[in-house]
Image (cartoon, rainbow, N blue to C red):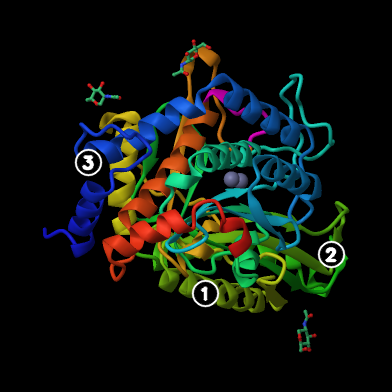
Amino acid sequence: MAFPKWVSLIFIAIVIMPLPISSNQSLSPEEELAQIPVLFLEYAKRQDLFDRMVSIRRKIHENPELCYEELETSKLIRAELDRLGIHYKYPLAETGVVGFVGTGGPPFVAIRADMDALAMQEIVEWEHKSKIPGKMHGCGHDAHVAMLLGAASILQEHRHQLQGTVVLVFQPAEEGCAGAKKMLEEGALEHVSAIFALHVAGEHPIGSVASRPGPILAASGFFEAVISGKGGHAAIPQHTIDPILAASNVIVSLQHLVSREADPLDSQVVTVGKFQGGGAFNVIPDSVTIGGTFRAFSKESFVQLRQRIKEVITGQASVQRCNATVLFNEIEKPFYPVTVNDKDLHDFFGKVAGDLLGPRNVFEKQPLMGAEDFSFYQEVIPGYFFFLGMKNDSQGQYKPGHSPDFRVNEDVLPYGAAFHASLATRYLLENQPKSTSMSDQKKKSTSTKGNFHDEL
Ligand SMILES: *[C@@H]1O[C@H](CO)[C@@H](O)[C@H](O)[C@H]1NC(C)=O
Ligand SMILES: *[C@@H]1O[C@H](CO)[C@@H](O)[C@H](O)[C@H]1NC(C)=O
Ligand SMILES: *[C@@H]1O[C@H](CO)[C@@H](O)[C@H](O)[C@H]1NC(C)=O
Ligand SMILES: [Zn+2]
Ligand SMILES: [Zn+2]
């Protein structure tokens, strides 16, 4: 396997201009790069930064906000960026914020946090429990915001050593509303050549990460169907057309899509989670509404599944003399594409993660049928999504996301901040533009020092 040209170019660049982050002249270029994550983790674990991240996370946790309503969360993010002296754009996608740290010039690399909570009730009794009934940060996005702000602080502290620009993406509405899509439409990733994001994970030990190249999370969509018949007396079925029975057959037939039509080695899901119809023991209702979700790991399988769901519902309903209308409701609940990790970024991530945690704490992840709107970014530029472990058996069980007793292990915050900052810094160092000569680079990095605020 030959190394791309830029690798040797970077090594030359490093020999000529030692990386100032560790400024240890006796280290080789590789050792110098390897030092960055170690130093950033030490920095992120410092008491003042740790306390700050914990306090931000708890504030957001107490006041969870849903899709596109993240006004207070957004305000808190902007206040922290102001405090750090970081320039930002606002609003994008209603409540989104995009910050900039570094030279203001290329290359640009993005690190992303989602901001929204879930419509569910927290059952954990603790001092900073959600103050809003029926809303909860049950997926850890409060921690994601705190970690990205922690990274912002580390990066701003080292801004003169950044060889390019880090774009801090604070994104609303991950949970079903496709905030990422809207952020993209409003230009959040202009000039950006790669993007990284993490998700806290209670099933992996703290101090470890897990991910994989290629597809890691599924494409996801929702459907809703109204099956209409003819209501009447439950004891005189011959004068009715029973939509309950028709809907029952529809649901059974839908299960055959995955069991009989899909390749057993190509994972797919069809789940009917909603079944509404009738209200009396002795009345056959006029209509029944069913709804559910479908998942697949490739665009082709996803499109095929969508088509067959529609055909099966209408076809099976008509077998029972009912009519059916099927809606995919893409405006309100857009389809999420497959989350596909870029293979080169996977190799890059492996190196940085190995330097940060030691190679034996970097795990290969099995794909999950869950979905992420991070996939929208990956449709446009190379992106990388990984899971950050927070399990600590001496602190009890950490439940999966979306559980009412979900908890975040706050010890994870420094790891997340160090990961964001290290991935961004190293990406910039290792992806300098090929065309620029070394002396130009040197000139640029000194001449733009400190005045990037005016440029953006
Ligand atoms: C530079 O790195 C070497 C090798 O890791 C170490 O022994 C030395 O103490 C470092 N020097 C400074 C000034 O950090
Ligand atoms: C189904 O639609 C057809 C055409 O609109 C209509 O004639 C029929 O009455 C409908 N059947 C039911 C059960 O609603
Ligand atoms: C796990 O939890 C225990 C008890 O709170 C703590 O002492 C220890 O440092 C934690 N381990 C890690 C790796 O955070
Ligand atoms: Zn979630
Ligand atoms: Zn989430």
Q: What residue type is labelled 3?
A: Glu
Name the residue carrying label 3. 30
Which circle, 2 or 3, is nearer the viewer? Answer: 3
Residue 408 on the magenta segment: yes
- Asked which secondary structure carries label 1, the reply is helix
Mark 1 lies within 8 Å of ligand 2 (Cβ measured): no
Part of the protein shown in magenta: 403-411
Residue 127: x and y, percent? Answer: 76, 19
Residue 374: x and y, percent? Answer: 53, 57
Which circle, 3 or 1, is nearer the viewer? Answer: 3
- Asked which secondary structure carries label 3, the reply is helix
Q: Which comes before the other along the chain, label 3 or label 1? A: 3
Would you say 66 lies left or right of 265 here? right
Give whichever of 415, 18 is nearer the camera: 18
Residue under the image location 53 percent in, 65 percent down? 376
Whether 355 is drawn above or below 305: the answer is above
Q: Do the residues labelled 2 and 1 touch (CB within 8 Å)?
A: no
Name the residue carrying label 2. 285
Characterize the local packing of mark 3: few (<14), some (14-19) or many (20 or more) Cα atoms within 10 angstroms.
few
Whether 445 is drawn above or below 127: the answer is below
Q: Is the magenta stretch mostly helix, strand or loop?
A: loop
Q: Which amino acid does label 2 sit on?
A: Pro
Residue under the image location 75 percent in, 67 percent down? 243
Name the residue carrying label 1. 308
Whether 300 is drawn above or below 221: the answer is below
Residue 25: x and y, percent? Answer: 24, 34
Q: Which amino acid does label 1 sit on?
A: Arg
Marks 3/1: CA distance? 53 Å
Which circle, 2 or 1, is nearer the viewer? Answer: 1
Q: Is residue 150 visible?
A: yes
Q: Which mark is residue 262?
A: none
Mark 3 lies within 8 Å of ligand 1 (Cβ measured): no
